[in-house]
Image (cartoon, rainbow, N blue to C red):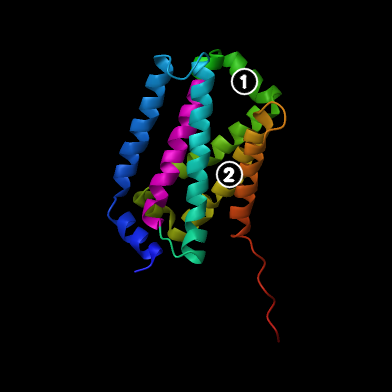
Amino acid sequence: MSAAQTINTAVRRVPGWALYIVGAAYGAWLFYLGATGGLGVEPIEALEHRYGKIAFQLLLVGLAVTPLRQHVGLNLLCWRRALGVLAFFFVLAHFLVWAVLDVQRLAAIWADIVERPYVTIGMAGFLCLIPLAVTSNNLAVRKMGAASWRKLHKLVYPAAVLGAVHYVWLVKGFQLEPLIYLAVTLALLATRFRPTKARVA
């Protein structure tokens, strides 16, 4: 049995709901660390950044599911929905920490969204993910139809690009890590938009 087959067998034994439990527990653990001084001298900023980075990492793993299956033989399809929902959970947590604990005032929140481009871009990415989270269930697939549902869920592509640009823009000075995330995002999307070869008559 190949390594990919071994991993696939192990993955099938872990149900999606286990990922929800682990993700929720980890999010709660990070919040506990922030509330008890475990995230340094700027716990709100640290928590906000940790939630945002985890959300983006989960989004990228979700985007990697198809190319991993096609090119490596690694099948994580049974986890894709859980990965997407958890990505939204952490994006929402990222937003709430920023809005409720950091900025705090509605007028200041709106001013940041309008006046700070990296916040505007991040908010646009967040809005792209909301309909995906709402429709990440079997009932939505049945009501919308598989074709319409798949078309809607392509919003994950602009959401990922917006998230990457948001990350690059918010850091101070030149930092390599956000650029690596941007490059990985574009590479993953490029695997889905490869030009088809023209047919020979």
Is 89 within the magenta?
yes
Mark whose residue sits in front, 1 or 2:
2
Is 173 within the magenta?
no
Q: Say if 123 sits above or below 146 in the image.
A: above
Tell me the element at label 1: helix
Magenta part, dominant SS: helix
Q: Tell me which corner region of the image, top left, top right, bottom left or bottom right, holds residue 23.
A: top left
Q: Which residue is mark 1?
A: 110
Which stretch appears magenta? 76-98
Q: Which mark is residue 160?
A: 2
In space, the residues marked 1 and 2 are separated at their CA atoms by 23 Å
Query: Quadrant where the N terminus lies?
Result: bottom left
Which residue is found at the position 50% from the left and 18% from the top? 44
Q: Earlier in the sequence, mark 1 or mark 2?
A: 1
Q: Residues within 10 Å of mark 1 (few under 14, many from 20)?
A: some
Q: Say if 200 sits above or below 172 in the image.
A: below
Tell me if residue 136 can be seen: no
Where does residue 43 sit, x and y in percent of width and height? 49, 17
Tell me if residue 110 can be seen: yes
Q: Three-letter amino acid code at disc 1? A: Trp
Which residue is found at the position 48% from the left and 36% from the top? 54
Q: Which mark is residue 145?
A: none
The reply to whether discs 1 and 2 touch (Cβ–Cβ < 8 Å) is: no
Which residue is found at the position 40% from the left and 63% from the top? 4
Query: Quadrant where the C terminus lies?
Result: bottom right
**Is 201 on the left-hand or right-hand side of 48?**
right
19 or 6, nearer to the observer = 6
Where does residue 36 sit, x and y in percent of width and height? 39, 14
